[in-house]
Image (spheres, helix red, strand yellow):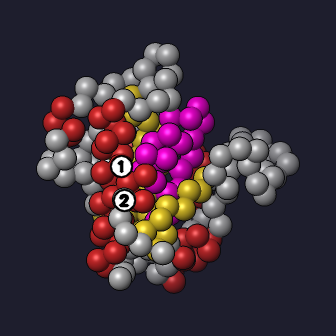
Amino acid sequence: MSDILVLYYSRNGSVARLARQIARGIGEVDGMSARLRTVPPVAAVTQTAAPPVPEDGAPYVERADLAECSGLLLGSPTRFGNMAAPLKHFLDSLGAEWASGTLVGKPAGVFTSTASQHGGQEATLLTMLVPLLHHGCVIAGIPYTEPALSTTRGGGTPYGASHVAGQQDDPQPTEDEAVLARALGKRIAQLAARLHP
């Protein structure tokens, strides 16, 4: 089995639920499995270090997860058209992995969630791709051959999977959002199987 690392930060559960849909898509590809990981929160003031294991959900990412994966999917809620600080903080710490080429040639994609329809999803997805390009990843999005991309009334973009939580902060993806998240996971897994058989 080859692992696709699904690495995310989720504050209210929406991104975590997209991650699980992406993991389902990865599981549809023979020989591929999803490795769900998260990043610890950051604080503006110094406080006690985060525990080594979160109270619930996916375990915290370790550098070995990056080295061992065959592909990568990054997820974050949108913060003014950009990824949330915890994910950015983790990515900013990967100088050694960048210098050694840990992610070079690995397929990668991105996913996000916003509270509003025009909350900066596409800007967030594009800014999340920039560090992946610097790391030498092979970037992939969702092609328009996926019918739900043309019918969705919520999230879902060619740049990556997305979810609109709405005014009630509903973490549950719509059917189209879930279909597109699974399609992205499956696509990255298929690319990984071809690039790293």
Residue 6 in the image, given as x and y percentages of width and height: 49, 57
Residue 30: % across, % down: 37, 69
**Over which residues does the magenta segment extend?**
4-23
- The disc placed on residue 28 is 2
Q: Which residue appears at 49% of the width and 61% of the height?
A: 34
Whether label 2 touches label 1, CB < 8 Å: yes
- Relative vertical location of residue 77 with respect to residue 31 in this rendering, above or below: above
User: Under tag 1, what secondary structure?
Assistant: helix
Answer left or right for 96 relative to 107: right
* Quadrant position of residue 192: bottom left
Q: Is residue 50 magenta?
A: no
Relative placement, left or right, of 41 versus 155 is right
- Figure quadrant of the C terminus: bottom left
| Rendering quarter of residue 166 | top left
Q: Residues within 10 Å of mark 1 (few under 14, many from 20)?
A: many
Can you tell which mark lies on residue 20? none
Q: Position of residue 31 (x, y in %)?
A: 41, 72
State the residue at coordinates (18%, 32%).
Answer: 151
The amino acid type, in three-letter code, at marker 2 is Glu
Q: Is residue 1 visible?
A: yes
Marks 2, 1: nearer the viewer: 2
Q: x, y (%) of residue 19?
A: 48, 47
Q: Find disc 1 in the rendering and name its residue.
A: 182
Q: Is residue 15 magenta?
A: yes
What residue do we see at 43% from left, 68% from top?
32
Q: In screen coordinates, is 127 left or right of 75?
A: left
The residue located at (59%, 56%) in the rendering is: 37
